[in-house]
Amino acid sequence: MTRIAFVSPLFLLLACSGGDPASSDRPDSGADAALPEDGGVVPDAGHPEDGGEPGDAGESVDAGKPDDAGLPEDGGEPGDAGLPADGGDPTDAGSPCDVAWTDVQFGGALDDEITDLRIGDDGTLYLTGYEGGLTGVTNIEPTGDALGFVRALHPDGSAGWKTTFDTTGTDTVESLALVPGGFRIAGRTTGAFPNHTNQGQQDTFVAALDAVGTVTRIVQTGSVKPQHPRRISTFGEFLYVGGQDDDYVPTNTNYVESWSDTTLAAFEEHADGTVRAWDWALGSAGTDFGTSVLAVPGGVFLSGMSDSGAQRGPFVRRFSSDADFLWGARLTQVALDAAADLALTPGGDLLVAGSTLTQVGAVSYGEMDAFVMRIDPVSGTLLAKWQAGGPDTDWVTGMDVDAAGNVYLTGVTWGKIDPDATFHGDEDAFVLRFDASGQRTGWWQEGTPGLDTPSAVRVDRCGRVFVAGYTEGPLAGAHEGRRDAFVRRVTFR
């Protein structure tokens, strides 16, 4: 079987010249109130026409019980234990704010990676990813007998429960959403779960887990094209999964029949099962990627990028829960620019974070910079934008926002994110913090001689900031194998 996978535009970058770094990162007020020259509005095209259910939606099955280590005795909802008795100030005695944290790194002889991170109200960290995979062998990463996982870490970093997903093929868990009473996850498999049949080279699966990690429902769907879900977001009975169909090379051939297409799938949960309600796909003549989804009342936002055609560049689009296309905006016109993640401000505006080779804020700092755009969620109108970075390439992979409206970006840098930073090797991990107006208020950069690649940044209710991903060195503890998974607490400078 030929296996193909998403190749980040980061690794397609050509060498380009960059400007000198400025001494501060200043936001642009967005007074021009318009996205780039095309007006920022994407025509109403590509709407799913059938809105139908795939024939392989399948039955829900119980995939078994997780390890019982560290399970809460009351079996309650995630994040409902250890809170202040009155539900009030998180600095009250006994809250996670009083707990000392120990950084976490784990792995084996092969490759291990954290793909997503969420934090409950009680300070418990929930991780998704894979263990025992192989990278650098084929275009798809990982390959081999990787198994997917969801695991909990207590507020001090000690291990809690762990649930694994393991077919005869390659399995990863890509993303996690916290819901009342448990979790929803999205992953991919080259195998088949019980009572399901693999539809092609790589299928999507979504699963429901209760508060202690027991799988209560799993649905596997797919097509002949390899599926690559990247993020899941939920609202009410809807689960939205954004990503792409990877480049499709028919089995036993050596040609690409179709390039990667951005995809959005909506699943609807019912008492008797979960069905794939509708699908949308954006396919240009070239390569298109989906990067994030964000569910809101009545619909969902999707971010991604397209490398060719009239609408090349990073984009964000909004759909209703019935698959109606509401609006779309192209963020830049540069094919290698990327929209990495989505979030809402405390006031309800949409934030889009990504990376750009051009100037979108007041200053351009280097070869590729981080950017944030604040957009009206109803109309798609640009409200503000800012840009930050060092003199080299800075590639954003995740974003979070706290209750005060502070914005946190994580990613990798090929140099120094700040003149006072130290560059450690191949790729360093970084986190940038901005206030609600876009002024940079802090930075963090750490690394090893190898790759140090974060996938997510999260801030808990105490204001503690964590970054998670993979490393090829002793970034957060002893180096166990090739790629190790890590979680580090961030201290800003």
Image (cartoon, rainbow, N blue to C red):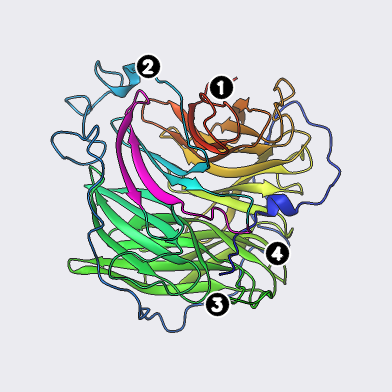
- Counting residues from the N terminus, which is met first, the one under dot 4 or under dot 2? 2
> For mark 3, does the 10 Å Cα neighbourhood hold few (<14), some (14 to 19), or many (20 or more) residues?
few
Q: Residue at x 53, y 42 (%)?
A: 110
Question: The magenta stretch spans which residues?
Answer: 138-165
Return the residue found at the far right: 17
Residue matched to label 4: 307
Tell me whether the residue at label 4 lies in contact with that at label 3, contact meaning CB atoms closer than 8 angstroms. no
> For mark 4, does the 10 Å Cα neighbourhood hold few (<14), some (14 to 19), or many (20 or more) residues?
many
Provide the secondary structure element on which disc 1 rests. loop
> For mark 1, does the 10 Å Cα neighbourhood hold few (<14), some (14 to 19), or many (20 or more) residues?
few
Provide the secondary structure element on which disc 3 rests. loop
Image position, residue 5 (x, y; %): 59, 61
Which quarter of the rendered picture does the C terminus lie within? top right
For residue 323, say whether it is visible.
no
Image position, residue 30 (x, y; %): 65, 47
Instruction: Check if residue 394 falls in the magenta segment.
Output: no
From the viewer's perspective, is the residue at label 4 or at label 2 nearer?
2
Tell me whether the residue at label 4 lies in contact with that at label 2, contact meaning CB atoms closer than 8 angstroms. no
Return the residue found at the far bottom: 50
Label 2 and label 1: CA atoms lie apart by 17 Å
- Counting residues from the N terminus, which is met first, the one under dot 2 or under dot 1? 2
Residue matched to label 3: 46
Which quarter of the rendered picture does the N terminus lie within? bottom right
Tell me whether the residue at label 4 lies in contact with that at label 1, contact meaning CB atoms closer than 8 angstroms. no
Residue matched to label 1: 492
Residue matched to label 2: 100
Left/right of residue 99 with respect to residue 143 in the rendered view = left
